[in-house]
Structures are given as structure tokens and as C-alpha cells.
Amino acid sequence: MTGPLWEQVAGMAADVMGVDASTLDERSGPEQIQTWDSVQHLNLVLALEAQFSLQFEPEEIDQMTTLGRIAEIIKAHQGSTTTG
Amino acid sequence: MEVWRAASRTNEMNERRTDIDRWIGQGAIAEAQAGLSELLSTEGLSNATAAFSVSRYEKLRPHISLIPYRVAILRSLTVEPVVPMLRAAGFANGLDLTVHLGEFNAYAQEILDGTSALYRFGPQAVILATETRSLAPELWSEQGDSGTDGWEAVIARVSQQYRDWIKAFRQRSDAHLILHTLAPPLSPALGVFDAQSDSGQQQALEELNRRIRILAREHRGVYTLDYAALVARQGQENWYDERKWISMRLPIAAAHLPRLAREWLRYLHPLSGRIAKVVVVDLDNTLWGGVVGEDGPTGIRLDGEHPGAAYRALQRALMDLTRRGILLAIASKNNPADALEVLEQHSGMLLRPRNFSAMRINWNDKAESLREIAAELNVGIDTLAFLDDNPVERRRVRTELPEVIVIDLPEDPWQYAGKVRDCPFFERLSLSEEDRHRSEYYAAEKQRATLETSCVTREDFLRSLEQVVEISEVNPSTLGRVAQLTQKTNQFNLTTKRYSEQQISELASNPDCQVWSVRVVDRYMDNGLVGVAITRSEGPTCEIDTLLLSCRVIGRGVETALLAHLAEVARQGGKTRLEGRFLPTKKNAPAREFYSSQGFDVVREEPTATLWGLDLESGAPSWPDWIQHRAPAEVTT
């Protein structure tokens, strides 16, 4: 996955999980990344909410099992026009 | 356009991170520190930026100067995501915070149980972050109805809980305690009728908060944080996130979590002593709009209209800081004549030359000007805050003098005043008379310095000061100032032991200890309480635990007078020896030679200190004859 939205999601996940952004792809999730526990999951959710000025539904937060899913959920919130 | 902006923003964010990691790798500590400060100013304290910053500060920690401080947070809400924000902002501000989190909603047990993890942690400050919905659910929920008895029963129950907690806490800990007050519900159960009725929820909460504030004032080291006001500044509808309250017990929206961290820091700065004593301001485009050298004194923007009014708002904020005992100084690259014409004569100026304790208006490097100002005012360089609209000057000061507190001014001058008012380095939790009049003291000091150069000999000068010194035992009215002096005095301080009001009060009631305060009056003014000594009886020896003087009165013989007093009291108490330690710090070089200059001999070298001793039978320092000694009752305020 590429594009500015992906760059932002991967950049924030890298910051929160303490890993290098270049090691992340759309399948990255708690399974692959050791530091991705429930506290860091909440931190990532909050970072994304503040960055994109939105609030996720509790169901969406539960569905965020990979970075690819996260990018899709944000895209759905934003509509298709602004994400390129 | 949208795409391009997002992409360039991401690139910029990545570049900043790459630069920081490269500087850390190269050991360029000051650059890495400056980069991290700028990163936090630009991006704000998001969970991502905070996590990145904390991990990089952890690497820098051994190489930079930080004040360690231990904070416990007891809570009725999820605050885990706020902790990295608090630590990141703390690191950027020179504080190394160790944070202990209480269990969710277990604050009452943790306070009441003397063996709880809270007390084992050994906190220096404890924050009790509670919300109305958990403490007084009747006053929060939609079923809120006082019935016929009014809310008195709820108010009495909750305020009694606070009373019990404070009492239990004080028996077990001398840490500072910060209590969140209780915020009102989004809309009262009775709608607009709530305000008409004398049993409304809003009124009941106000009464409860009033009682909590009174309880806090009745106890030393207990403070309130106005949580309702913090919420109100953002608006309740923005602040709360009910979805996350239900699913994660996190009631605050993501965008506002950094504000809670920053509000806590406004308390932790004054408590840990990480404070600014002087604000050094730039002139052009900071105190006024435009450049006086180019626009001329009549061309600069400084009036009641836009944008001049924004600069006047900043001047008003700076004026307010002087009432907290913070001094103002100028570091400006300008022709002195141009700048002084505005300072002295421009009708829009609220601040005048007399409001500035030091001025450097020249073409020198600002880092050099800051060094000179610190030396002139006798304060540590790490107590200077620097306010300049020019990011290049800020970066220069950050890398040249990493200890200086650099305030990042936003581009919009309308935000200048708010930035200064929100700055945690300027917060104080107690204000003494000395604080309120500090800038006048410095004005008098300038006159005194003029006199010194005109006097023939040093002794003539000291005589001409007509000093009167009063040394008395600490009492309830001087307790606060005495504790403050132990916390803030760095230079003439033999042991640099920091004591809270609570600890001073305990020392004063210990029969083996004596706590002395020193007041100095001279021909110019009453300097107020400017010195402290604490002694402890050890068999035939009187041991000096603490001896300090404010830098305002160093070198005028007051230190000798204080030692002569301690020797006299010790002798009257049957002691034969006076002993005291010198513990060197980065800042107390002015005190290094003190004991040797007073005839003390080295008893032994210890790992972190030198122990000095004096035989009282063979001699003792005598009271300088140019200082008048007054009994406490004769000098009153």
C-alpha cells in the first residue's frame, strides 16, 4: 500500500510501537509486532483520532487487526475524495 | 492539493525524526534536544509524537541535565494514554518524571492503606484525578434529583471523604497532593429549572468544590486543580467522549488528552522547582509589531487596534508575571537609541524601562546577552526563559545554551499572550511578599551597585548600607517562605537540601533541631526573609544541616552574622563544637570557601561532601560591627 494516508498511518504506528516505519506493511498487526499490546492499541487509536479529527466506533476499534484494515476504516470515515 | 499537503507533511515529519536519530547517533546532544523540543512544538503532544519523543529522550537521558521527580496518579478514569504525553513534555522541560498509576477506581483504598503500592512508590507529588460521575454519581446522572432533603447529604458525604483522605494521606506521606475539583454534568437533570431552584445540581457542585478548596487550604502541601475550568476552556461537548467512557473508561476525547498532561505540568513545575525566574524578551515583532530601526518609532504597531493590540496583550501578560516575582529583561539586536525611544516614550507601551531588571540592546550574539543577564541578576542560566519571535534566534539559544527555557512563539501575534500565560515555568503555588515586590528589590539593587562604585573602600560601602539583621526561629507565618528558600536557593547554599513546608514544620517541632530565618533591612529597603539556617544537636556538637542566603544579600557580611548567631546559641546550649558540611553542586561555588574563610577546619572528606568543624572554646566568628543586630520583636512587618 502507498500514498499519503498509508504513510501517515505507518508513521504513527511506527512512533507508537517503537519500530522502523520501513518494516511495516498492510498486514502488520499485533501478531507480528511484539510491542502492539492493548495499551499501545489504544494509544494508536487516539493518535489517529487526533490526527484525522474523527472518532472511531467501538466496533471499528475491535476490527483494527492490521494496518491495512486501519487505513480502510479511516478512508471510509473520510470518504473517497480527500485520500487520493 | 490536499494530497500534496498531506504528503509533504509526512515527509517533513519523517525528516525531523531522521535528523533527531542522526544527531543522537553522532552524539550531537544539544542538536538532538533542540530537534525534539521543536518536534513537540510543531506536532503537539499526540500519542504518536509523545511515544517517539519518550523513546529518544530515554537515550539522551544520561547526557542531559534533568530534575528527577516521582508522581503518583490516583484515578477514576483511564489515564494510561496521558502518561507518555506527560513524560515527553516533562523531558522537553527538563523534568525526568517517574509515574506510578493507581488501580482504576481504587484511590480510596490506596490512600487509606498505609502499606499500599502508593506509599511503597514514595511519591513526591500525588494527583487525585477523580470525576463527578464516580465520586458523586447523584450529581452527574440524569436521575439527579435531590428529593426533599436537598443535596446537603451528598455534599457532606463527599467532603467528609476528602477530609478523611487528606488526613490519612498526611499521616503516611509528606508528598504534595493535588486534588481535581468536580466538573458539572453536560446538562442538569432539571434543565433550565436547575438554575432557578435552590436545590440545583450546578449549585450543589459549586458548594462541594468550595468545601474541597477550603480543605486544601487548611492543609500544607495540598492544592486544587480546577478541572471544571479546564473542561470549560475547551467546552464540555468537545471535551468528553461518551463512547470511549463506556468502552474503555476513558471519558476525554483524544484531541484533549494533551491538555490534561499540560495542566498537571503546571503543578509539577513549581513543585519540583523547575521554574523560570526571569523572562528575557526580544523587542521587534515580539513586544511590538514591526522593526523600529526600519519603521521608526511612529511606524511600529502598538496601539488598541489590530494588530497592535495583540502585542499590548503580551505586554499585559508579562506585567502580570512580575506580580508573581518573575523579573523581566531585554535581549534585542537594535540601536539602543531607537529602542529606548520606544521604551521610554511610545504611548502604546505598557512596560517601561523601570519594569526591566536588565537590558542588553546591542548587536551581540543573544546567547552572550543571556549569559550576561544571568550574571548581572545573579541567577542560574537555567532559570532564564527566552521569548523571541525569530526561530533562528531560538534555535541558536537552544543549541548554545540548552539549559535556557526557550518558548516557541506561534506565528500569530494574537497567540503570544496565551503562550506566556500557559507556560508552566511561570506557575507558582505560593506567593510571598518577597515575590510580589521582587522587581522593586532589583531596582534598589541597581542603586546600591552605583553606590558601591562611589564608595572609597569596601568597608565604607558595607557601613553605608546601614544593614539591620534579625534572626528568629521559624513560626507559622514564616514557614512558607523558609521552605521556599530551601527549594529555590542554589548559589549560596552549603548543602542544597530541599524541604517542603510540611518537613520544615516537622523539623521545627523536633526538640533537637532549630530552624532559623534571617531578615535583612538596609537603607534602601526591607529585603524580607532572605536566609535560613537549620541546626541539629548531636551530643556536644551543634551540626549545621542547612545554611543558605538569597543571592541578593551575599557578600555583605550577613553570612558571618548568621554563623556568629549559630555559634552563640550553640554555646549557650552547652555545645563545644560547631560542624557543617559543604556539598558541592553545579551551582553553589559561591559557598565553597565559606567555612574555611570563617576559621573552620576540615574534619574529613566524605564521598559527596566535606565536613568542616570549629571548636567553640577556642574561638568563634564574631558579628560584623557594620551590621546592627535586632531582636525579633523590634523589626515587624
Image (cartoon, rainbow, N blue to C red):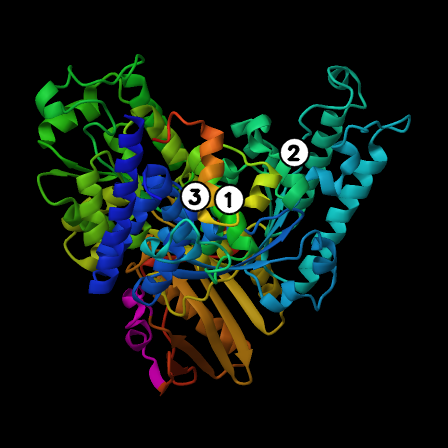
Depicted B195 relative to depicted B126: above or below: above
Q: How many marks?
A: 3
Taking depth in this image into account, of B424 and B446 the one nearest to the observer is B424
Residue B485 in the figure: left or right of residue B305: right
Which of the two discs, 3 and 1, sits closer to the camera?
1
Residue type marked 1: Val
| Residue B183 badge | 2
Return the residue at label 3: B46
Q: Quadrant of the N terminus of chain B?
A: top left
Q: Position of residue B62 (x, y in %)?
A: 33, 68
Q: Position of residue B369 (x, y in %)?
A: 16, 46
Q: Position of residue B549 (x, y in %)?
A: 38, 59
What kind of element bears circle 3? loop
Return the residue at label 1: A45
Q: Is residue B591 magenta?
A: yes
Residue B601 in the figure: left or right of residue B481: left
Residue type marked 3: Ser
Residue type marked 2: Ala
Residue B68 in the figure: left or right of residue B335: right
Do labels 3 and 1 touch, CB within 8 Å?
no
Per the rendered image, the range of residues in magenta is: B585-602
Q: Residue furthest top?
A: B305
Both labels 3 and 2 in a single chain: yes
Chain under callout 2:
B
Chain under callout 3:
B
* Mark 3 closeness class: few <14, some 14–19, many ≥20 residues within 10 Å: many
Whether residue B326 is visible here, answered yes or no, is: no
